[in-house]
Image (tube, rainbow, N blue to C red):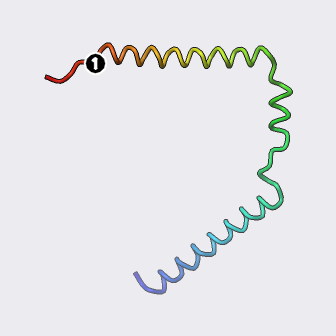
């Protein structure tokens, strides 16, 4: 490849990278990534029933992991 082509490619990629960085900084500065109502909505729409379901699912997950660990211990056989 020609040196001129490589120089143009480096220049264009640097320009695109700088543009992307500038867009990211602008978005952070103007609050485009902030979600101010996330925690309020979570508290407002999270009822006792949903919390109970989440706790039950967590207990089931732990029981499955314990059962799997016990099963792995029972099937262990040392090498000959």
Where on the picture, by quarter, is residue 69? top left
**Residue 38 relative to residue 78: left or right:** right
Residue beneath the point at 83% across and 28% down: 43
Where on the picture, by quarter, is residue 68? top left
Where on the picture, by quarter, is residue 12? bottom right
Residue beneath the point at 74% across and 19% down: 51
Q: Quadrant of the C terminus?
A: top left
The location of residue 44, given as percent across then percent down, is: 86, 27
The location of residue 77, given as percent across then percent down, is: 23, 18
The location of residue 29, given as percent across then percent down, is: 80, 61
The location of residue 59, given as percent across then percent down, is: 59, 16
Q: Nearer the viewer, residue 11 or 51?
A: 51
- Establish if 34 lies above or below 80: below
Instruction: Find disc 1 in the rendering and name its residue.
Output: 76
Q: Quadrant of the N terminus?
A: bottom left
Residue beneath the point at 66% across and 72% down: 18
Residue beneath the point at 80% across and 44% down: 35
Q: Residues within 10 Å of mark 1 (few under 14, many from 20)?
A: few
- Establish if 76 lies above or below 19: above
Tag 1 secondary structure: loop
**Residue 12 relative to residue 4: left or right:** right
- Establish if 13 lies above or below 70: below
Count the marks: how many? 1
Q: Nearer the viewer, residue 50 or 80?
A: 80
**Residue 41 relative to residue 69: left or right:** right
Q: Can you name the residue that lies furthest to the left here?
A: 80
């Amino acid at each position: 490849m020609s040196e001129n082509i490589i120089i143009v490619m480096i220049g264009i990629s640097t320009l695109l990278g700088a543009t992307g960085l500038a867009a990211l900084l602008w978005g952070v500065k103007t609050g485009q990534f902030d979600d101010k109502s996330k925690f309020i909505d979570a508290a407002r729409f999270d009822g006792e029933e949903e919390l109970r379901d989440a706790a039950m699912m967590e207990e089931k997950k732990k029981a499955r992991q314990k059962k799997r660990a016990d099963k792995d211990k029972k099937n262990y056989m040392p090498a000959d």
